[in-house]
Amino acid sequence: MQANDVRALKSAAIPTIVVGLVVVVAAALLAGGAGALGAAIGVALVAVFFTIGLAAVTWAGRVSPQMMMLAAVLGYLVKVILLMVLLSAFREATAFSPRALGWSVVLCTITWTIGEVRAFLKLKMLYVDPSAEVPGQGRRT
């Protein structure tokens, strides 16, 4: 990962962990150990899914900008589908609180997304390659 990608990961992961800890404590107070376990599972799911997604987008960005966009869109689609499948599969779970799991996934996803957007807005990236060749005009100087 490049420095910008690590910065984006830290900007998203740190607030998500903080919010996740608050959600785990709140779930423990409201629903006991089962609530805390459900919330902790939700935090872990979001952290793993979104870290893998950022790594995939970073890798695709090295291939081409088009691949980066494709990886971002497909990664988002896969994450949403997997989270929906997991939430529906564990709807009747008794070992942990599915409600706490759901709320922690929602809150941590929102936090991660805000952190990632904030990080990318703060990046100082060139939108145009200054050393690129212009077709029919040779190299720009």
Image (cartoon, rainbow, N blue to C red):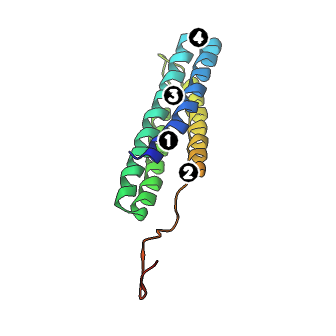
The alpha-carbon separation of the residues under discs 1 and 4 comes to 35 Å
Residue picked out by circle 3: 43
Q: What residue occupies the far front of the structure in this picture?
A: 141
Q: Does residue 82 appear in this view?
A: yes
Viewer-side residue, 135 vs 35: 135
Viewer-side residue, 19 vs 35: 19
The alpha-carbon separation of the residues under discs 3 and 2 comes to 26 Å
| Cβ–Cβ under 8 Å for marks 1 and 3 | no
Residue occupying the point 52% across, 62% down: 126
Which amino acid type is marked by label 3? Val
Residue picked out by circle 4: 32
Residue 33 occupies which quadrant of the picture?
top right
Which amino acid type is marked by label 2? Leu
The alpha-carbon separation of the residues under discs 4 and 3 comes to 17 Å
Which amino acid type is marked by label 1? Arg
Which amino acid type is marked by label 4? Gly
Mark positioned earlier in the residue sequence (1 or 4): 1
Residue occupying the point 61% across, 23% down: 23
Residue picked out by circle 1: 7
| Cβ–Cβ under 8 Å for marks 2 and 1 | yes
Mark positioned earlier in the residue sequence (3 or 2): 3
The alpha-carbon separation of the residues under discs 2 and 4 comes to 41 Å
Mark positioned earlier in the residue sequence (2 or 1): 1
Residue picked out by circle 2: 123
Q: Nearer the viewer, mark 4 or mark 3?
A: 3
Q: Nearer the viewer, mark 2 or mark 4?
A: 2
Residue 117 vs 70, above or below: the answer is above
Residue 112 occupies which quadrant of the picture?
top right
Q: Nearer the viewer, mark 1 or mark 4?
A: 1
